[in-house]
Image (tube, helix red, strand yellow):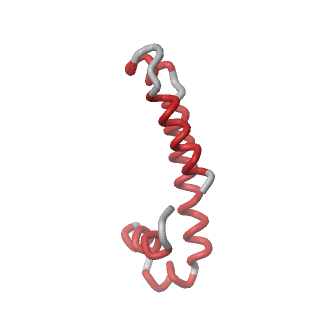
Amino acid sequence: MMTQDEIIEMAVQAGMAKEIAEVNIDIVEAFAKLVAAKERETILKYANSDEFNRSKGENSPYAFELTKWIEARGNT
């Protein structure tokens, strides 16, 4: 999980004034959570895909381990 300072720094890197990010931290944090959730969803979709599983071997444990780790990150 990212800290507020990390989220503010990312907002600043994206072009938002630090003061605006700090005053609107609830909105900025909510946006960061939405972005992280979408990224997890995209990675989970790939990890469960035939393309990924074929590249790692038909009975590879990689996809299972990866999806469990990502799902756990989404529950914190």
Q: Residue 72's spot in the image, x, y percent?
A: 57, 47
Quadrant of the snapshot with the C terminus = bottom right
Find residue 10 and report its image quarter: bottom left
Vertical side of 48 occupied by 42: above or below:
below
The structure residue drawn at horizontal position 43% and vertical position 81%, both measured from the top left corner, is 18
Number of numbered labels in the structure image: 0
Q: Residue 33's spot in the image, x, y percent?
A: 57, 60
The structure residue drawn at horizontal position 40% and vertical position 16%, both measured from the top left corner, is 57
* Drawn side of residue 65 relative to residue 71, left or right: left
Front residue of 3/39: it is 3
Q: Residue furthest top?
A: 58
Vertical side of 6 occupied by 60: above or below:
above
Front residue of 63/11: it is 63
The structure residue drawn at horizontal position 56% and vertical position 69%, both measured from the top left corner, is 29
The structure residue drawn at horizontal position 52% and vertical position 30%, both measured from the top left corner, is 64
Front residue of 74/36: it is 74
Vertical side of 7 occupied by 21: above or below:
below
Q: Residue 65's spot in the image, x, y percent?
A: 49, 34
Front residue of 41/71: it is 71
Q: Residue 3's spot in the image, x, y percent?
A: 48, 71
